[in-house]
Image: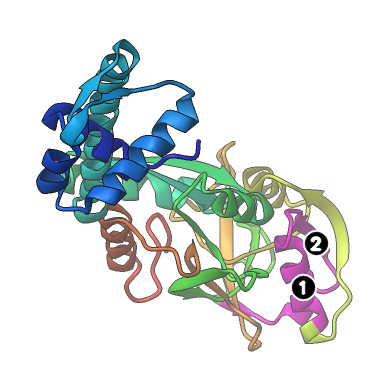
Amino acid sequence: MRFTLKQLEYFVAAGEAGSITGASERVHISQPSISSAISLVEAEFGVQLFIRHHAQGLSLTPQGQRLLREAKLLLVQAAELEASAGELSTQVGGMLPIGCLVTLYPLLVPELIQVFRARHRSASVHAIAGDQAALLGQLRRGDIALALTYDLDIPPDVELLPLAKLPPTALVAARHRLARRRTVDLAELAGEPFLLLDLPMSREYFLSLFHQAGIEPKIAGRFEHLEVLRSMVARGEGFGLVNARPRNRASLDGRKLAYLGLEATLRPLVHGAAVMRGVRRTKTAEAFLALCREVTQGDHLPGTV
């Protein structure tokens, strides 16, 4: 398509005014510009739209009359689209697609959706879960407006808006010999079976903690689902490492768990909202980000202790 909406607007003005002069006065553009626009539209469609008369008078051909009706409808639709786009950028409303790291999804999403819906009745949130690699891909494709995740290999074209800093925590069964402790050194667990949360980028982070402490982990299992890992830990099959501590201190099958803070200064994870760098955010996205900041004050996440 080699014509523009502006050229269609000039054609419509000429068709309604019946002259180049009248169209020029109506849209406040020069007569040569009107004539050029009409000639381009005629060339694009391969039809004659006007019969030219003396003294710049014009009358529409049958093809011109049909195109005039369609062009007017298209211009109305374009105006409605522009108005809708303006509303999206200035009002809180409509659907907001977001992503959330699969391990955080059941903790964060329910409260965020419920509170956001209560505050903004004309807006809704569609949240999908994924691992870090999947979320970054969806963010780049424009499938989601933002992703609630950690600072794990954030690429240069993505910006992480920090919300909370979460240090690593050891997860053990309630009957574990160290379960009554509040903190533990990672070295005290080094000889025990380690159950790894085996997700892209997460696995590298947890293994790096052992490297930082100068310890070789004794990996006894790899699990892609956090709740499976929690259940295995609760059964006494080994210990795990997490960053978010759910308020529920039991696995899905009801067995009790204990959280132990790690005494060494190990790298924490920064939880935040990942957005495409340089992309203007809508009012709806800004309102959701404001809620995220509100509920994570003091490095506290919804659903966690």
The Cα atoms of the two marked residues, 1 and 2, are separated by: 8 Å
Q: Position of residue 221 (x, y in %)?
A: 84, 52
Residue 5 visible in this rendered orientation of the protein: no
Residue 27 visible? The answer is yes
Which of the two discs, 1 and 2, labels the residue nearer the N terminus?
1
- Find residue 211 and report its image quarter: bottom right
Q: Residue at x 27, y 34 (%)?
A: 11
Q: Residue 181 location, x and y as percent?
A: 58, 74
User: Which callout, 1 or 2, points to the residue nearer the camera?
Assistant: 2
Residue occupying the point 33% across, 48% down: 111
Q: Is residue 18 above or below residue 210?
A: above
Quarter-wise, where is residue 22 in the image?
A: top left
Secondary structure type for disc 1: helix
Sort mark 1 into few (<14), some (14-19) or many (20+) by Cα contacts within 10 Å. Answer: some
185 or 117: nearer the eye?
A: 117
Judging depth in this view, the residue of 170 and 150 nearest the camera is: 150
Which residues make up the magenta segment?
183-211
For disc 2, the neighbor class at 10 Å (few under 14, some 14 to 19, many from 20) is many
| Above/below status of 25 relative to 262 | above
- Magenta span has 204? yes
Residue 193 is situated, as x and y percent measured from the top left of the image, at 83, 61
**Measured along the vertical axis of the image, is residue 77 above or below residue 7?**
above
Which residue is at 50% across, 49% downward? Answer: 99
> Disc 1 designates what residue?
189
Determine if the magenta segment contains residue 194.
yes
Residue type highlighted by circle 2: Phe
In the rendered structure, are the residues bearing label 1 and label 2 in contact, judged by CB atoms less than 8 Å apart?
yes
Residue reaching furthest to the bottom: 265
Q: Which residue is mark 2?
A: 194
